[in-house]
Image (spheres, coloured by chain):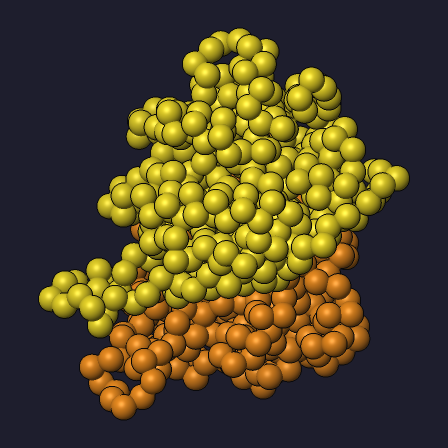
Chain colours: A yellow, B orange
Amino acid sequence: MSTTSYDVCAIGNALVDVIADAGEDFLLEHKIAKGGMTLIDAERAGTLYDMIGPAIQMSGGSAANTVAGIASLGGRPAYMGKVKADQLGAIFRHDMHAQGVYFATSPSADRRMEIREVPNERRQGAPTGRCLILVTPDAQRSMNTYLGAAIEFGPDDVQTEIVRDSQVTYLEGYLFDPPEAKKAFRLAAQVAHEAGRQLSLTLSDVFCVDRHRAEFTELIKNEIDILFANQNELMALYQTKDLDAAIAVARTQCKLVITTRSEKGAIIAAGAETVTVPAAPVAAVVDTTGAGDLYAAGFLFGLTQGLPLAESGRIGAMAAAEVISHYGPRPQKKLKDLIRKNTAVA
Amino acid sequence: MSTTSYDVCAIGNALVDVIADAGEDFLLEHKIAKGGMTLIDAERAGTLYDMIGPAIQMSGGSAANTVAGIASLGGRPAYMGKVKADQLGAIFRHDMHAQGVYFATSPSADRRMEIREVPNERRQGAPTGRCLILVTPDAQRSMNTYLGAAIEFGPDDVQTEIVRDSQVTYLEGYLFDPPEAKKAFRLAAQVAHEAGRQLSLTLSDVFCVDRHRAEFTELIKNEIDILFANQNELMALYQTKDLDAAIAVARTQCKLVITTRSEKGAIIAAGAETVTVPAAPVAAVVDTTGAGDLYAAGFLFGLTQGLPLAESGRIGAMAAAEVISHYGPRPQKKLKDLIRKNTAVA
């Protein structure tokens, strides 16, 4: 078993989710891509927020949700991501610590001393990023992300000693959107491999794959050990409508390729071996936000505990089932207890 | 029917709720009064927040929850309460507007220009108030309130034209805690009566009753038309263990006395008349926060729509049942649709 201090360290865009119900017509009227993640600027974030219904606020961010899940399962995760020292940033920080995630990235600097003659809010730097999530009656979520302070995460924020001291370094594809974060991603990858650690990537989102296909393909081929994707993302990556064909390519490039397929369960490809894992039952799907993030949490927890692939996949399925049974992208129940009830292991 | 612009205008402490699960042992260890509302200062709010688990954030505030419920039912409510122009204040304001509540109280002033030589955060005035709510496994909620900017609500914030233009002015007992808010309460009461409108009070909390018993008793006798209380609050008010005796006194003092008794349903006393209303069924009680607030919402909605007492009580029971079936003090479903499904009226 591991001699590292951390099972998984993750780097991602640190965000607070703002979750509201919306009708299909609202998405159409406001040109919101259903089921996807759209990057928006501060102005759009403001006007969109003015139009959405009453909301609930919870810490979010894809990779952050994953490490929160790992902590809830009893694992030892670390996280790096950038918030600002404001109220939403305090919420994000609190939830990381309260969940048991090591998180010490310094908040974005107040630029008051550096930039003069600009409006007060600019002088103080961008606020903590947020994701306006609209949940339609079919429980599908459509995400509108204002990166805010997350855009300032850069190579200097990569705590290389943590990367070296983690079995797996987990990176979200969304990191390729802010230019400095991409540099940080590259640095973390290099450090992880030099230390003999494993590198994991989630493709994040179909649109994200479209934006960064060439770089993702090269990265997966040369650097990624463990790839997470849903079926649409993997098919988008290889520009095919044939999932089996996409998996056939991916399995030649990464040691482990985990493809989630919502209620149809997941396919784990490990070299020549293929393991299929059914989805866990859910009484009522309320909000699918975080399903992929929590699947990755469960799988990485199992993997870093040395469990078999099928068992790791089953824990992923259970963690995903919990998170889609309520609003918000993080577990409401202690996953460790939930898993213990449903399995002999862990 | 009404010729006013608003059915109900409410005044209350404007708060954002921070909701986390906690064990019974946590309440004991940190001396938190179970089921009650304890006022805490900024320092205690900070240390307590550091100790609680991952949280969700939602707009709250007792009377604010009530008007949110009235809006969700299709009524026309207004609200007055004080936040600061910060991120939590923006959340509170957004949710009021998004729910359809008229809310135009100016945020607390930034004191930067007035007070010098004090730390930055003091200079800028207290932040938006918040309530740290701990939910134990039995779904009971224990509240720890840092009033923050709410403490600055005063008589100048009472929009007297709104009070005059509302069928009912609804005041929360919690307003008696901040001294300026109590003055505002008194002013609103005077304006409402001079305009021939009805005045309603909720006793809020047993500890609140203990703090303000003499004033509450005098107020109820002389000014309140519609009194809301749960059984413990009403018995605390009259310092008796006999609920019937407490109701017997109260009914001689207010036109309408609505006593909620959790799963045992409510007793509505209207002069010599008594109407009992059963609780509405709930599949699973998750978090009792907002139960009383939403009962008042449903009842006041029915009353201001001219519905019979029993029907108003039944709408209150359904609104309360919805809010205790999930985390947070405000409806997740559009109550108008929920009520329509379950009743011929409305």
Which is more toward the observer, A184 or B127? A184
Q: Position of residue A112 (x, y in %)?
A: 23, 70
Q: Outermost residue, bottom direction?
A: B117
Q: Residue at x 69, y 77 (%)?
A: B30
Image position of B331 with respect to B197: above or below: above
Image position of A192 with respect to A321: above or below: below
Q: Position of residue B76 (x, y in %)?
A: 39, 48
**Residue B206 visible from this viewpoint:** yes
Image position of A318 with respect to B167: above or below: above
Which is more toward the observer, B230 or A156? A156
- Residue B254 occupies quadrant: bottom right
Q: Residue at x 57, y 30 (%)?
A: A227
Q: Residue at x 63, y 66 (%)?
A: B52
Relative horizontal placement of residue A35, taking residue A43 as reference (left or right): right
* Count of numbered tags: 0
Q: Outermost residue, right direction?
A: A344
Q: Position of residue A176 (x, y in %)?
A: 38, 38
- Residue B343 occupies quadrant: top right
Relative horizontal placement of residue B131, taking residue A175 as reference (left or right): right
Q: Position of residue A117 (x, y in %)?
A: 11, 66
Which is more toward the observer, B8 or A162? A162
Q: Residue at x 30, y 67 (%)?
A: A110
Quadrant where the N terminus of chain B sits is top left
Q: Outermost residue, front direction?
A: A194
